[in-house]
Amino acid sequence: MEPATLQLLTDILLTFVYAGAVIAVLMGITMYTVLAERKVCGWLQGRIGPNRTALPIIASIPIIGPFMRGLGLFQPLADGGKFLFKEEPIPAHVNKVYYQLAPVIAMVPALLTVTVVPFGVWWDSVGVKHPLVLANIEIGILFLLAISSLGVYGIVMAGWAANSKFPFMGGIRSSAQMISYELAMVVSLLPVLMWSNGPGSTAGLSFYGIVTAQENGWWLIFAQPLSALIFLVALFAETNRLPFDMPESETELVGGFQTEYGAFKFGMFFVAEYAHIVVGSAVFSLLFLGGWDFLPFSSFNPYPENWFGSLLSIGWFLVKVCSLIFFFIWIRWTLPRFRYDQVMNIGWKILLPLAIGNLIFYTLILAIYDANR
Amino acid sequence: MVVGRNPVNGAMFMILSLVGVAGLFVLLNAFFLAVLQILVYAGAVMVLFLFIVMLLDVDVVSKRSPGNLTIAAGTVSVFLLGLGFVALLDRPQMLPEPTLLAPERLPSLETPMAFVTGIQAYGYSLFTKYMLPFQMTGLLLLVAMIGIIVLSKRFENKSV
């Protein structure tokens, strides 16, 4: 085989390996987010949470085994196994094609968005810094918004295909809610992009560019707290988390769009929801918390320029992501659910005008700043 | 897609074809356009379509036989379309011959090309050379929006 062909084949193979590794890590974090949800919920309500599941050999290691069992570290395996081996009944009244397609359509955008999310840095042999990311495209933020806006189809299709009242209501609510909050979300991002694309900057619309802009200055959550707040609220609505979980508000709609689903198909919706939370936390920490940047107000950079520095940057980034995931869970078990009309009012009458006012304010600030330089 | 009677099927296939068009943009290296296509059409416009279709709960539309006028208009337009194709293929000189214009200023060592990302270049030309068309598009959309509000609200002359 020619060297060029071999090189090409190796590149293609490596791309698959990298993609598989990133998906595996994402799914791992997602699994343990589910566990964290149950554990944190338990602690907030004065309970213990899952602490009984045990793997045969590991759990019988003297001190570590019972400790891991108490933390519930084996619980995700049991949950996944349960979903996998349950019987999958298909109700007789559903539209079979869309019923089977919906969980897949919900899952794909959730996993696809992770391709443009950088999670660390590495230095090549001449010391140039590169992001650790599957696809470092110039329009990463737009790509993420576009793909995550496709996520609503999974829910809408599930609600429609189930062909019964409550899932249908869930699907309708979710499409209205997602469209409303997407607007506020995108408008709240515009000041962020203007801030990091000053004259001479090549940050563009890529996550890496935004993080680089924050490395040499303030984290954007301190520079633009209102943008961060609007983005966070819209993120809660887009990921269908409480207090915005209209599509599946179980006290009103049984289980919302996933009422008619069981076994692994339900599991896919479940995993997609938590994958959205993980990716959403990652995006928030990249945009507003400086990604892997060490300190908010200085350009101090403690990472040595080698593989160990890369590992440290990934670790610090994951610390931020996990804190945000904890914040998501904390909010869920603290606040009650909004009424549906309240959700719409907040979206259209508060968040959107606030986001537009925020945009005008920062446009003026930046114009004055640029004029006086 | 065109002959299907189920409106939800139709909407789904339209989403599929819009995503397909985005794929074509990607093959043309127009990534920005591709992402905008998905963001605007597949992500926002079609969600509204689907929302309306589902909310009105349109069942499978019954088959209607087209009227005589429709058939006549269809025949004429197909004929005109065919005529246009033949005319274009028969006389290729109808299209202007592409010529390369001499560039006003080539980048050189003294006047290097500024390093910009693709979107910055796009935005720069949008807000300088194409400012007027851009503003006009915005105005048109505003007029359309006001028109829809007027049509759908049906303001009545309330006697106070």
Image (cartoon, coloured by chain):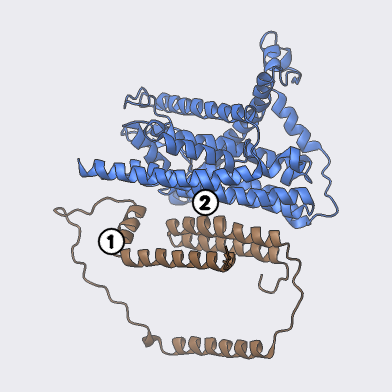
Chain colours: A blue, B brown
Quadrant placement of the C terminus of chain A: top left
Residue B66, x across and y down, in percent: 70, 84
What subunit carries mark 1? B
Q: Residue A61's image quarter? A: top right
Q: Which residue type carries mark 1?
A: Thr
- Residue visible at 47% across and 29% down in the picture: A317
Q: Position of residue A169 (x, y in %)?
A: 72, 50
**Looking at the image, which is closer to me, A143 or A253?**
A253
Residue positioned 72% across, 46% down in the render: A257
Crowding near the residue tagged with mark 2, few <14, some 14–19, many ≥20 C-alpha atoms within 10 Å: many
Would residue B37 be found to the left or right of residue A273 on screen?
A: left
Q: Position of residue A223 (x, y in %)?
A: 36, 33
Where is mark 2, residue-wise? A146
Label 1: how many Cα within 10 Å (few below 14, some 14–19, many 20+): few
Report the Cα–Cα distance between label 1 and label 2.
Answer: 27 Å
Marks 1 and 2 share the same chain: no
Q: In the rendered image of this protein, does residue B39 appear above or below residue A62? A: below
| Image coordinates for residue A310, horizontal then vertical, percent | 42, 28
In depth, the one of A292 and A95 nearer the eye is A95
Q: Nearer the viewer, residue A100 or A132?
A: A100
**Can you tell which mark lies on residue B128?**
1
Q: Residue furthest right?
A: A92
**Residue drawn at point x = 73 percent, y = 33 percent:** A80
User: Furthest residue to the top?
Assistant: A62
Element under disc 2 = helix
Left or right of A183 on screen, residue A251: right
